[in-house]
Amino acid sequence: MSDSRKLLKQAAMQIGAGGSAGFVEVCIMHPLDLVKTRFQLQSAKVHAPGDPHYYTGIADCMKKMYRNEGFFAFWKGVLPPILVETPKRAVKFFTFEQYKKFFLFGSPTPTPLTFSLAGLGAGVTEAILVNPFEVVKVTLQSNRAHLKEIPSTWTVTKQIVTTQGIGFRGLNKGVTATILRNGVFNMVYFGFYHSVKGYLPEYEDHLQEFFRKVGIGFVSGTLASCVNIPFDVAKSRIQGPQPVAGQIKYRTTLGSMAIVYREEGWRALYKGLLPKVLRLGPGGAIMLVVYDYAYQYLTLRFPD
């Protein structure tokens, strides 16, 4: 097989494995992403205790959502991530593998710095591609009406384009926050996972090896979530409904973080951390493990 065909084959397998990882992860973990977004959009100036839409914790949020919006409301806004997760994760894992080649800095094998910088590059690339879907997803997730009453994904997308356009106040609003959120997350996520996985010995037993990867993936997703959540809060505030209709309060990433800190305290920059960790801890493990096994399967299925 020629070198060019071999590279194309590897790229196809990386894209296929990455897409599979993204699809499985989003279908399982989306409800926690929705709960995280609800907490990040919750402001003391808008939602006060006693408000039926004020949430005191994850269980309280889920109970009120189930009672007021129905069971399938936990998958509100799931269509945009499903539509984008397959290509998004495919791009994420594919570009990570390509960026690794650029950040070897003369080393014969990848180093922790290589993995971290490649993860940063993959996160930035991923964020630019998926931001419009994030805007639609957050708009749908912020709607507290019963599931039967909320508009469709296509209706929301058309409304955003018609009223706000496709620029930085429309489908691409909050793109800087998304870049920072995804870039920082993937830098920690890939950097930690591949560095630690390389230091810890593999098990010959398949079950033990599976749990080794799951454990490292869980810690990777948890650490990355804790580091990048202030950017995630800023992103949700920018992309979600503004407190006063017709007035844009949250414009820039750092400006939004400053407003949240000034009005609600530093802890507000970590709103939604628990559901985020509950989602991206196991979600991060699911993605990396599914990717590893899917890539191994494709390698065996389509040998050179």
Image (tube, rainbow, N blue to C red):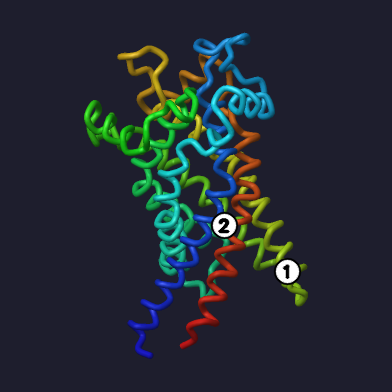
Is residue 217 rendered to the left or right of residue 97? Answer: right
Q: Secondary structure at mark 2?
A: helix
Cα separation, mark 1 vs mark 2, equals 16 Å
Is residue 131 rendered to the left or right of residue 164? Answer: right
Q: Is residue 179 above or below residue 100?
A: above
Q: Which mark is residue 209?
A: 1
User: x%, y% of residue 92?
Assistant: 44, 57
Residue lying farthest to the bottom in this orientation:
1
Tell me where residue 287 sits by quadrant: bottom right
Residue lying farthest to the front in this orientation:
148
Q: Residue at left 37%, top 27%?
A: 252
Q: Which mark is residue 96?
A: none
User: x%, y% of residue 299?
Assistant: 52, 79
Name which of mark 1 and mark 2 comes first in the sequence: 1
Tell me where residue 198 sits by quadrant: bottom right
Q: Secondary structure at mark 1?
A: helix
Q: Is residue 259 above or below residue 208?
A: above
Q: Is residue 113 above or below residue 203?
A: above
Tell me where residue 72 sits by quadrant: top right
Q: Is residue 187 above or below residue 139?
A: below
Q: Amino acid at mark 2?
A: Met
Query: Pointer 2: what residue?
Result: 287
| Callout 1 touching callout 2 (CB < 8 Å) | no
The residue carrying pointer 2 sits among few (fewer than 14), some (14 to 19) or many (20 or more) residues within 10 Å by Cα, namely: many
Q: Amino acid at mark 1?
A: Glu
